[in-house]
Image (cartoon, coloured by chain):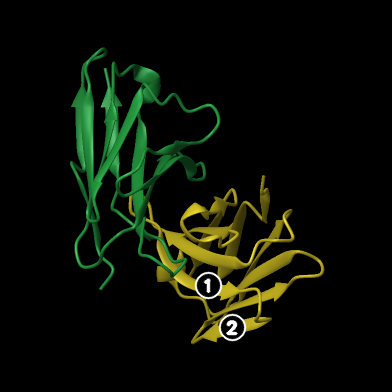
Chain colours: A yellow, B green
Amino acid sequence: GENVEQHPSTLSVQEGDSAVIKCTYSDSASNYFPWYKQELGKRPQLIIDIRSNVGEKKDQRIAVTLNKTAKHFSLHITETQPEDSAVYFCAASINTGTASKLTFGTGTRLQVTL
Amino acid sequence: GAVVSQHPSRVICKSGTSVKIECRSLDFQATTMFWYRQFPKQSLMLMATSNEGSKATYEQGVEKDKFLINHASLTLSTLTVTSAHPEDSSFYICSARATGPETQYFGPGTRLLVL
């Protein structure tokens, strides 16, 4: 089955700096890659996603890049703010209709310091 | 849109009892619902996938007789933890997905503590 690795496990940046989180996946058939933000004790919230027919996607301060050949994708957060502090999870899935399911990375704890 | 609710948010029970957790999609029809378990400072681990009107598909290592899943309608799935033990204490989160789109929307989670 699919295996998703995520690095780093913790990341501390100063407010205003950029943060980059990287994930690799094992199954070349995976075609959907969402990123979730989870605050302590709360539900994961989708912040951005990308499909395999696209190499990059941006939404304000958040961007995701995908390299299908290398089977890795990255989350980029620019101009970080204290409210960006949370745990971020990448995930990958093969969209086969009702049978598709997400495989999550191990998470990155982002701390944005003042 | 795409709101998923979960009830209860927190439950404490005695060892040996059963606990039922409800997951509802409030503003869309969820063809597929997923149940995850998350231990402190760990990732989300998929327990099972349920499609409306059919039996759930359990991940390897998850006991289907212990974690009973029912997906009787397009807006409701339930997870029953039977004969709960302290090691079942965890954060249980459901997610729901409509037909077609891959996006999963998560419920707020249920924190289960088994004494």
Q: Residue furthest right?
A: A69
Tell me residue A99's x, y (percent): 50, 52
Q: Residue at x 30, y 19 (%)?
A: B84
Q: Which circle's residue, 1 or 2, is located before the other in the chain? A: 1
Position of B61 compared to B92: left or right?
right
- The chain to which mark 2 is attached is A
Quadrant housing the C terminus of chain B: top left
Which one is nearer the viewer's eye here, B99 or A60?
Answer: B99
Amino acid type, residue under disc 1 in the picture = Asp
The residues tagged by marks 1 and 2 sit, at their Cα atoms, a distance apart of 8 Å
Dot 1 and dot 2 within a common chain = yes
Question: Residue tagged by mark 2?
Answer: A57
Q: Are marks 1 and 2 in contact (CB under 8 Å)?
A: yes
**Residue A15 vertical position relative to residue B58 in the rendered view, above or below:** below
Which one is nearer the viewer's eye here, B72 or A93?
Answer: B72
Question: Residue tagged by mark 1?
Answer: A49
Tell me residue A85's x, y (percent): 46, 63
Position of A34 compared to B113: left or right?
right
Tell me residue A84's x, y (percent): 45, 69
State the image quarter where residue B85 is shown. top left
Q: Residue at x 51, y 76 (%)?
A: A80
- The chain to which mark 1 is attached is A
Position of B84 compared to B102: left or right?
left
**Residue B41 vertical position relative to residue A6 in the rendered view, above or below:** above
Amino acid type, residue under disc 2 in the picture = Lys
Tell me residue A86's x, y (percent): 45, 59
**Disc 2 element:** strand
